Amino acid sequence: GQQLNQSPQSMFIQEGEDVSMNCTSSSIFNTWLWYKQDPGEGPVLLIALYKAGELTSNGRLTAQFGITRKDSFLNISASIPSDVGIYFCAGQLWGGSEKLVFGKGMKLTVNP
Amino acid sequence: DVKVTQSSRYLVKRTGEKVFLECVQDMDHENMFWYRQDPGLGLRLIYFSYDVKMKEKGDIPEGYSVSREKKERFSLILESASTNQTSMYLCASSLGSPGDYGYTFGSGTRLTVV
């Protein structure tokens, strides 16, 4: 099945640092979503993007829907220990689908 | 808030056993999904259902079956559990097009087959 190319696969950072991650695809998407999975839990939706070029913030998180509709990025500013977890990008293909396509996830470790 | 409840957080089963993983959602969502999550492989879709008694194969359906007799409940069945089915299993649901609201996930069931 199709998967998004998500990078980096993991990051180890110090508390207070900023984090950037992105997802790319050769296909066009009409929606991009970013999820966070805390250890031992299911993923939870952080941000949803619906228009090409859209920039959306949720607290210290900022995400953008790429102009080409083939990519998206997520930034976390001033990281804190509770940011630890796995971050997934997901998208709905252009033309609609009952399913989302997911990236493999980015595992974030924050050292206090 | 929508809630997706998976019946067990941890399960240990023996090779060859028939295993049932249950998932219930409480907000009348049409679509329900079963994924397995393994390190380095991300989320892989096993089966999904967009209506009662309807089911569609995902990317890795082999060794699994599903049942959706009621709208709120979607069960994953391992007909004869094997050690390579040891994994984290995640259930999700969505209202209409998943691009509108995304999926709501359950907390997961960590299955160990010994």
Image (tube, coloured by chain):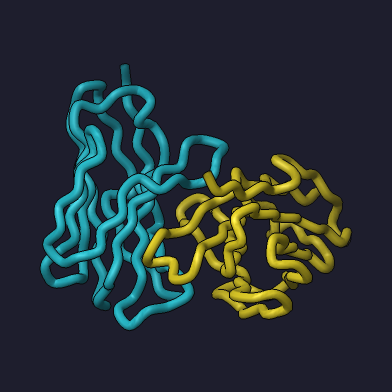
Residue drawn 35% across and 47% down?
A106
What is the x, y in percent for residue B63?
73, 71
Residue lying furthest bottom: A95
What is the x, y in percent for residue A34?
33, 52
In the picture, measured across the screen, residue A97 lies left or right of residue A110, that is: right
Residue closer to the observer: B45 or B80: B45
Residue drawn 82% across and 58% down?
B19
Rendered image quadrant of residue A78: top left
Residue closer to the observer: B1 or B13: B1
Q: Which chain is yellow?
A: B
What is the x, y in percent for residue B15?
84, 57
In the picture, measured across the screen, residue B85 lies left or right of residue A27, that is: right
Q: Which chain is cyan?
A: A
Residue drawn 19% across and 32% down?
A77
Residue drawn 66% across and 78% down?
B55
Residue lying furthest top: A112
What is the x, y in percent for residue A10?
33, 43
Rendered image quadrant of residue B65: bottom right
